[in-house]
């Protein structure tokens, strides 16, 4: 695929996903796999661009004071510690198993976005200890899975913050983006030791990812229509699931 086509895809993906608390890894990782990148190279590129998009969006959310640091910090510590473990586990999984797991994760994300109903925007104070323990446990799971699959983990973080820790939806999305920055770059650092990144590509693509994340976060703050975005994005995710499974079971991976 020509970079003239790929870079706008990176921009659009970062723009759309940062509006809902994601960094772009859900699209980047399967996209690079479909383009026949080696698994570790695809995952490292996905994590790097994921982190760049999340960082640009986090700037906006931090300035708007939408990030809950009491929940975010324990998640950052635990997810950053476990992301490298997940990254190293990638080399132990064969390509077919990896792709099937990735497809399953994306399918769950699509179903969650398509059918979940927005909860009431009422936060419940579960106490400092509850936030630290809950955030720490959630972060461990998110970090490992994100490092393994090349995604920042936002697709898991957002619903867990909303339904388990009772965080308001927009705060959950903003806090998720903040956490994804650290888990993504932590996983990327581990993948660099496994395979040399394509620096020329990811550094050029990073500019488009940063711009997309910055614009997407501003749209979320000012005029996000969550229901419409979730439905459109669900369709995109389902399409990638079909493409990944087609390539897995009908040939294409050696």
Image (cartoon, rainbow, N blue to C red):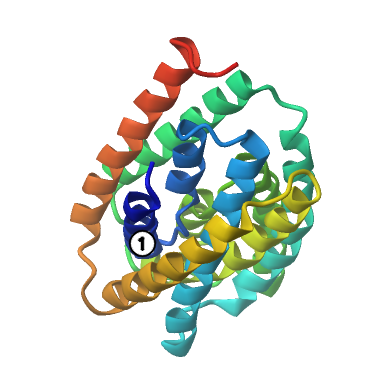
Pick the front one: 145 or 120 = 145
The quarter of the picture where the C terminus appears is: top right
Left or right placement of residue 190 versus residue 123 in this view: right
Q: Residue at x 38, y 41 (%)?
A: 1
Name which quarter of the figure residue 110 lies in: top left
From this view, report whether residue 165 is shown above or below residue 65.
above
From this view, report whether residue 30 is shown above or below residue 166.
above
Badge 1 marks a residue whose secondary structure is helix
From this view, report whether residue 52 is shown above or below residue 139.
below
Outermost residue, bottom side = 63
Q: Residue at x 59, y 19 (%)?
A: 96
Q: Residue at x 34, y 64 (%)?
A: 15
Pick the front one: 254 or 19 = 254
Specify whether residue 127 is in view.
no
Specify whether residue 80 is in view.
yes
Q: Position of residue 225 (x, y in %)?
A: 20, 64
Q: Position of residue 21 (x, y in %)?
A: 43, 62
Dot 1 corresponds to which residue? 11
Q: Disc count in the image?
A: 1
Pick the front one: 80 or 93 = 93
Left or right placement of residue 180 versus residue 90 in this view: left
Q: Position of residue 208 (x, y in %)?
A: 41, 66
Q: Position of residue 127 (x, y in %)?
A: 63, 72
From this view, report whether residue 22 is shown above or below residue 246.
below
Left or right placement of residue 137 versus residue 155 in this view: right
């Amino acid at each position: 695929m020509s970079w003239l086509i790929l870079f706008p895809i990176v921009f659009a993906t970062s723009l759309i996903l940062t509006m809902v608390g994601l960094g772009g890894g859900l699209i980047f990782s399967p996209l690079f796999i479909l383009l026949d990148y080696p698994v570790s190279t695809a995952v490292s590129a996905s994590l790097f661009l994921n982190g760049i998009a999340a960082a640009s969006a986090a700037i906006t959310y931090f300035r708007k004071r939408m990030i809950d640091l009491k929940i975010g910090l324990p998640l950052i510590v635990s997810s950053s510690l476990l992301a490298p473990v997940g990254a190293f586990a990638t080399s132990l999984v064969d390509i077919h198993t990896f792709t099937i797991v990735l497809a399953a994760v994306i399918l769950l994300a699509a179903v969650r976005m398509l059918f979940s109903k927005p909860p009431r925007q009422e936060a419940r104070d579960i106490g400092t200890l509850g936030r630290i323990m809950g955030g720490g446990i959630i972060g461990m799971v998110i970090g490992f899975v994100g490092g393994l699959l090349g995604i920042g983990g936002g697709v898991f973080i957002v619903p867990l913050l909303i339904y388990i820790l009772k965080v308001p939806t927009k705060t959950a999305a903003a806090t998720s983006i903040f956490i994804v920055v650290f888990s993504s770059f932590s996983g990327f650092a581990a993948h660099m030791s496994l395979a040399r990144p394509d620096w020329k590509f990811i550094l050029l693509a990073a500019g488009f990812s940063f711009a997309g994340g910055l614009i997407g976060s501003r749209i979320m703050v000012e005029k996000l229509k969550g229901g419409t975005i979730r439905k459109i994005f669900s369709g995109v995710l389902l399409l990638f699931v079909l493409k990944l499974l087609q390539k897995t079971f009908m040939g294409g991976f050696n």
